[in-house]
Amino acid sequence: MSAGGPVVVEAPARIHLGLIDLRGELGRRFGGTGMALREPSLVLEAWPAAELEATGPEAERILLYARRFLEHHRLRSGARLRLRRAIPAHAGLGSGTQLALATARALALLHGVAGDAASLATAVGRARRSAIGTWAFEHGGFILEGGRRTDGGAPGPLVLRRSIPESWRCVLAIPDVERGLSGGAEERAFRRLEPPPAALIGEIARLVLVLLLPSLVEADLAGFGRAVTEVQRRVGEMFRDVQGAPFAHPLVRELIDEMLAGGAAGAGQSSWGPAVYGFVEGDAAARALAARVEKRLGGRGLVVATGFDNAGARWVRKAGARPVRPAVE
């Protein structure tokens, strides 16, 4: 066990722009695109300790991931862990993956274990489908991942990582409606899904390759947003049988329309929702759109105007520091 002060890990939330291939005929399944956000983010503190202990918010989940990591590496010592700031859970922002990877990273630093984000994800049992959160944790920015092999193996490979233009902003809305699927419910939902038509998969892949990626490279927010909106419409059709509609809730659909009417270049639902995102250029446009969405929600949810995170997770060891009062209770 490493001696010294605590390790503090900060990890960004991510939005998921859509899965690409649920058929798996080419030997890989899922794949997709996503982006890391500056806000919300989580902050996890880990102290050296002989036994394993977690306190505060999400303590049980932290212990689950910590035990998996220690067992994977056959480590017998422990740590004292506390979540100081949390990403809203089960909202489509990758909170589970970021919490798992932050826990694994903190323990790896305390115990001198090397490993990239994909290795950490394997150790704690994440990235069994999408690897967007894994690569967003590692690198931040825009992520295109290639899908997980149908015969198992490692998380889907990172195909492209690119910094997001500094002037682009995201307005994020999390309405107070039923939370998105996770855990066993998510597993059952994927088992129930019928393979979508090959033509639909082809349309999504074409939009990503011919419109979304070139627009990102050229910093063309209008083209990028148009691509995301169109991808979202088609991805929603793939999940209609599970969600009952292309989007998770009628209010989600209404918020997407509101963002587009309010000037968003593109908008959609992140993962299973209910988080909704819209893209604009600059702080003034972000504040204006956020105010419009807040008015539409009427206090029935959270709205955040934020930039994109191009760095990924950060960590620091605070030598000689004492535990601080957590920011989240």
Image (tube, grey):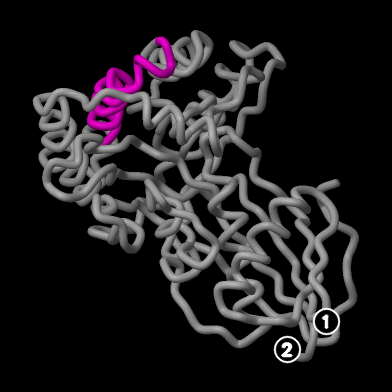
Disc 1 and disc 2: Cα gap in Å?
8 Å
The amino acid pointed to by label 2 is Met
The N terminus - image quarter: bottom right
Q: Residue at x 41, y 33 (%)?
A: 280
Q: Residue 295, how many percent across, how many down?
A: 63, 13
The percent position of residue 64, horizontal first and vertical second, equals 68, 57
Q: Main secondary structure of the magenta part?
A: helix
Local packing at callout 1 (Cα closer than 10 Å; few below 14, some 14-19, many 20+) is few
Q: Any magenta on residue 322?
A: no
Q: Looking at the rendering, which quadrant does residue 290 occupy?
A: top right
Residue type of the residue flagged with mark 1: Ala
In the rendered image, residue 199, in percent from the top left (x then y), is placed at 9, 25
Identify the element where label 2 is drawn: loop
**Label pair 1/2, CB-CB below 8 angstroms:** yes
* Residue 326 x, y percent position in the rendering: 85, 56
**Residue plotted at (34% across, 27% down):** 266
Asked whether, in this view, residue 206 is left or right of residue 125, the answer is left
Residue 1: which numbered mark, if any?
A: 2
The residue beneath circle 1 is 50
Q: Which residues are magenta?
A: 224-244
- Could you tell whether 78 is left or right of 172 in the image? right
Q: On the picture, is 94 further left or further right than 29?
A: right
Residue 205, numbered label: none
From this view, report whether residue 321 is shown above or below residue 208. below
